[in-house]
Amino acid sequence: MTAIPPDGAPERCGTLARREVVAAARAIGVSTDYGSARGLRLVREPAHLACIGLDIHQRRQWLAPAAARAFLRMRSAAADDGIELQVVSAFRSATYQLGIIRRKLERGQAMAEILAVSAAPGYSEHHSGRAVDLTCPGFPALEEAFEHSPAFAWLGKHAEGFGFRLSYPRDNPHGIAYEPWHWCWHARRRPNGSRA
């Protein structure tokens, strides 16, 4: 079981722990060239996290502080427009991702099938504390049907203004299935070169 640090935020993996998780993922079938073949890099986990509230299962969810502020502003703006953005998942550590992969293998899924819908441990944008999976009332979580929701339409028009982008559109170069629910915050550069 993952320990909860004193601030209540989930445990994060440092560099050494991440290496161990990646090695464990390789031992259960993730190829050694996964990152280069998929065009994905190992993801560093943030030193600090900020709570963004509860998800649809009433669990506290977390993002890196700047991403959390941007998300809360975006969710508020959506609410002002009558759109309810509900969180399904936000930060998760490489260790947690390894557990997801192991559980799917135990249920009999093949590694290729798993990696078509989940990034390998160490490579998920969720590790960065900048990615959030969203849904809205009346739509099942983590289903393509979300693309037909008013929330998805709103995100398509407004998310970029808050720094969020759809990470896995159809036919993306990473070989990950289309995920209309998965949005990642990217710090915007100011004219002086600093990040916003």
Image: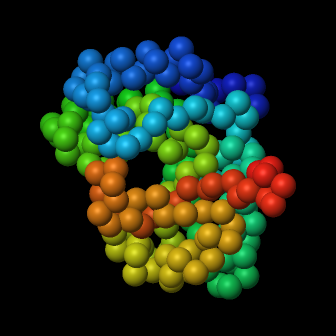
Q: Please name the residue shown 50% across and 45% down the image.
A: 125
Q: Is residue 175 above or below residue 31?
A: below
Q: Would residue 110 be found to the left or right of residue 15 on screen?
A: left
Q: Give the image's coloring scheme.
A: rainbow
Q: Would residue 123 be found to the left or right of residue 45 on screen?
A: left
Q: Please name the residue shown 32% across and 66% down the image.
A: 170
Q: Which quadrant of the structure image shows residue 113?
A: top left
State how many labels appear. Answer: 0
Q: Quadrant of the C terminus?
A: bottom right
Q: Please name the residue shown 75% across and 46% down the image.
A: 65
* Viewer-nearest residue: 84 or 162: 162
Q: Position of residue 106 (x, y in %)?
A: 22, 31
Is residue 43 in sight in this rendering?
Answer: yes
* Viewer-nearest residue: 179 or 78: 179
Q: Is residue 96 above or below residue 173?
A: above
* Viewer-nearest residue: 88 or 18: 18
Q: Would residue 70 be found to the left or right of residue 118 on screen?
A: right
Q: Position of residue 24 (x, y in %)?
A: 34, 18
Q: Is residue 150 above or below residue 12?
A: below
Q: Please name the residue shown 52% across and 44% down the image.
A: 126
Is residue 56 in sight in this rendering?
Answer: no
Q: Position of residue 103 (x, y in %)?
A: 29, 33
Q: Which quadrant of the structure image shows residue 35?
A: top left
Q: Residue furthest front?
A: 192
Q: Which quadrant of the structure image shows residue 71?
A: bottom right
Q: Residue furthest right?
A: 192
Q: Position of residue 191 (x, y in %)?
A: 81, 60
Q: Would residue 145 be found to the left or right of residue 83 on screen?
A: left
